[in-house]
Image: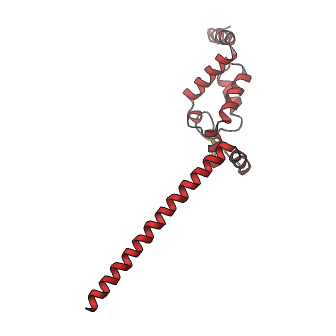
Amino acid sequence: MTQETALGAALKTAVQTMSKKKQTDMIADHIYGKYDVFKKFKPLAVGIDQDLIAVMPQYDPALIARVLANHCRRPRYLKALAKGGKRFDLNNRFKGEVTPEEQQIAAQNPAVKESLERLAAKKAEAAEKVQAKEAMQLEQDIAAAADNGSEASE
């Protein structure tokens, strides 16, 4: 047994003596600390669970899957899925796209639905303000043109 594998085996044994809660907390801390795709809640590549298991052999694959499932249920992640676009691997490289079906499923989550409705309402309100401002400017331009026309005829 090489020194590296002996060290890895010792680490795995030490980790497995911890409670499952402690291990899942360690896994979450590790992936949120190391991988931007998790920190920024980007849509994850299909099969990223296998990538995580490969880079964290000291942890039980079932616990890695639990942490990943918890991440993927968070409203912030579901909102990113609902927007669609590219999926990313652990190295933040493009690896696939979110399908329209996946977008639709994510958008059905109550928290995401509410968030998207609030966003749409804010956009509509902003558009109304722009329209009102443009209408007021147009009225001012018409009034100014009318004043200029009456001054010219005097």
Quarter occupied by residue 60: top right
Residue 15 at what x, y percent from top left?
66, 12
Q: In this image, 80 relative to 144: left or right?
A: right
Residue that lies at the very extreme toward the left in this rendered image: 154
Q: In the picture shown, does residue 59 fall above or below 95?
A: above
- Which residue sits at x=30%, y=87%? 150
Q: Please state the horizontal and vertical placement of residue 108, each as a whole percent of the image.
A: 71, 47
Which residue is nearer to you in this view: 88 or 65?
A: 65
**88 in relation to 27, above or below:** below
**Quadrant of the image for the C terminus?**
bottom left
99 w.r.t. 46: above or below: below
- Residue 28: where, in percent of width, then height? 62, 25
Q: Residue at x 71, y 27 (%)?
A: 66
Res 38 → quadrant: top right
Left or right of residue 16, residue 115 in this image: left
The N terminus sits in image quarter: top right
Q: Is residue 123 visible?
A: yes
Q: Looking at this view, is 71 or 93 the one in front?
A: 71
The answer to whether residue 85 is seen in the rendering is no
Query: In which quarter of the view is residue 23 placed?
Result: top right
Comparing 99 with 118, the one in front is 118
Residue nearest the observer in this picture, 46 or 43: 43
Colouring of the image:
secondary structure
